[in-house]
Amino acid sequence: MSRTVLVIKHVPWEGPGRIAHSLAADGLAMHTRTLVGQHDPAMPDLDRYAGVVLLGGPMRATDTATHPALAVERDLARDAVERDIPVLGICLGHQLLALALGAQLEPDAADEFGVAPVAPEGDGIVGVDGPLKVLHWHNDNASLPPGARLLASTPKCTNQAFRLGSALGLQFHLEVDPEMLERWFRVASVRAEFPGSPGAALTAMRRADARMAIAADAVFGQFARRVAES
């Protein structure tokens, strides 16, 4: 039985961050791949993996003409959920996962960048009581897939987190720590995309980090346990 998680990246500077720590703690290995630059990407073989992680990126989730790999990733996510393989989507990955499960994309529906709270909904996010400050970085929203449980929201984006079967989607970046965010801001295209002050964002991130780390350990730890038990 596989104990390897497929991690799909979209840009070099985005990595699994705190997700990797939780996977390692449960004795799980990672296989990191980047499909988005390929003209005719092949579907990864799900028989090789116990879980799937779709990370973030600046692409629009519906732009499959420019990035055909995004359609492959959506099919991969759908197939994994149908096979009850745990899937975790972050930001762009959250949107791809939601679309794969029947949601719609709402382009330019929000303008959320920087550290700000999300509010728990329903059962909420595991390990989190009350509002949690997280790192936001998106313009597009994904609607809630049919039958999904809403876990968190903001006034500008209803579907900040959801669960449906073996799928967990997070619109926000709980995997990022202050050091990773600092590395992001060293990338010229990242700085150009961010509408605020990088220095202010880093200060806010450091202030919120202790509680974010606790939440990340709980959320990603639960995901890792689901993978280990699947």
Image (cartoon, rainbow, N blue to C red):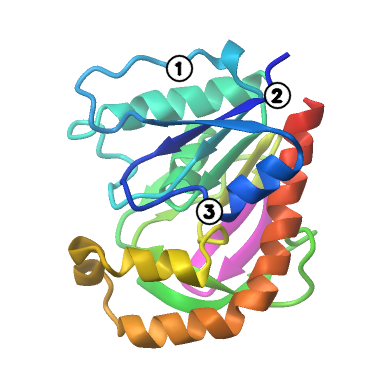
Above or below, comparing residue 168 to residue 219 in the picture: above
For marks 3 and 2, the one nearer the N-term is 3
For the residue pair 29 and 96, the one nearer the viewer reads as 29
SS class, disc 3: loop
Question: To which quarter of the image does residue 185 belong?
Answer: bottom left
Q: Where's residue 57, x and y in %? A: 34, 50
For the residue pair 63 and 57, the one nearer the viewer reads as 57
Q: Where's residue 79, x and y in %? A: 55, 20
Q: Which residue is mark 3?
A: 17
Question: To which quarter of the image does residue 167 belong?
Answer: top right
Q: Which residue is mark 2?
A: 84
Magenta residues span: 149-162
Q: Where's residue 76, x and y in %? A: 48, 23
Point out which mark residue 140 bears: none
Measured in 3D between alpha carbons, the distance from the residue under mark 1 to the one under mark 3, in whole angstroms, is 22 Å
Task: Give the side of residue 31 with respect to residue 113, left or right.
Answer: right
Residue 44 seen in the figure: yes
**Residue at left offset 33%, top offset 28%:** 35
Q: Where's residue 49, x and y in %? A: 60, 20
- Between marks 1 and 2 in the image, the one whose residue lies nearer the viewer: 1
SS class, disc 1: loop
Q: Residues within 10 Å of mark 1 (few under 14, many from 20)?
A: some
Is 33 magenta? The answer is no
For marks 1 and 3, the one nearer the N-term is 3
Question: To which quarter of the image does residue 197 belong?
Answer: bottom left
Is 158 magenta? The answer is yes
SS class, disc 2: loop
Q: Residues within 10 Å of mark 2 (few under 14, many from 20)?
A: some
Q: Amino acid at mark 1?
A: Pro
Pointers 1 and 2 in contact (CB under 8 A)?
A: no
Above or below, comparing residue 120 to residue 51 in the picture: below
Q: Which residue is mark 1?
A: 44
